[in-house]
Image (cartoon, grey):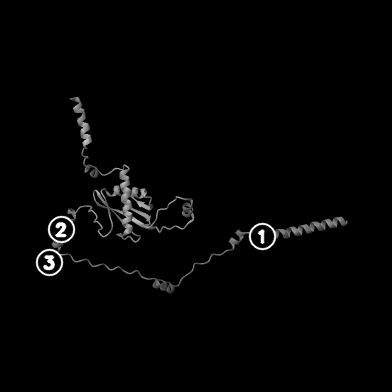
Amino acid sequence: MTIKCSARLIVGVLLVSGLSACGVIKSWFPDKERDYQFTTEIPELIIPDDLKNKASASLPSRPVEKALPEPDPVTGSRYTAESEDATTESADTNTAEESASDQTPESAPAASTSTASTLQIDQAKNAATRTVGKALTRQKLEVVERNIDKGYFYVKYDPKAEKVSDDSIWDEINFLFGDDPSQEQEYRVTVQSLGAEMSEVTVQNSKGESLSNQTANSLLGLIAEGINIGQQNGDPVKAEETTNEQPAPETNAEQSADEQPASEQQ
């Protein structure tokens, strides 16, 4: 009997808990279609006329573009006789300048710098620049920068530098570990064209001023000496220099040697 009562009680508790659980689950997932059925539409907003008039009055009105007045047609010439004369005179001046520019040569030779120490070479600019570069190499001068096309070299040179001697071991030690007695400065060696087959070599300091002092003379002398050494070693010389040489006259010994076979035949 007690077992039946307890079973009924358990079944009743389960039924009550199941119904409450269904209600809780239904609250988690509401029925939106039912909510939509009970919704009402909001009526359209009605704006009074006075507010509409104020809003239209506050908007800026677009300005009307004014038509530009048409220019007056030209009925006659505005130039007077004086202006016509001035125009003809300016035209004549321009034609005279153009004719003078046509008569001038395209490339005039550069003027020689008379105040500076110079070295003239009987070659064109590019050939003379290469000759100067070879001379600097022969004289073992330190070339910092070179530009054959523009015709300049930057070298370091000390005219008071003494030739280092390495006769003894002490000289070599002093050269390696001693103080450097040379006071080399940077100079610019420039090659300028004076004509089709004539060039000029000058020396400038760091400020670009052409020099005419002992340093420039010494450096140009080294370049000239290097060019002479190259000619002695068989470097090609200009044709003008070689054709001007005359054959040496025959000596008496050569003449007697030429006459001796003729006497023997007789």
Crowding around mark 1 (Cα neighbors within 10 Å: few <14, some 14 to 19, many 20+) is few
Q: Secondary structure at mark 3?
A: helix
Q: Secondary structure at mark 2?
A: helix
Residue 96 is labelled as 2
Query: Residue 1 location, x and y as percent?
Result: 88, 56
* Residue located 32% across and 50% down the image: 225
Nearest to N terminus: mark 3 or mark 1: 1
Q: Which residue is mark 1?
A: 28
**Mark 2, mark 1: which one is toward the viewer?**
2
Nearest to N terminus: mark 2 or mark 1: 1
| Disc 3 + disc 2, Cβ < 8 Å | no
Q: Which residue is mark 3?
A: 82
Residue 236 is labelled as none
| Disc 3 + disc 1, Cβ < 8 Å | no
For the C terminus, the quadrant is top left
What whole-number distance in Å separates the C-alpha atoms at marks 3 and 1?
105 Å
Q: Secondary structure at mark 1?
A: helix
Nearest to N terminus: mark 3 or mark 2: 3
For this rendering, which residue is in front, 84 or 74? 84
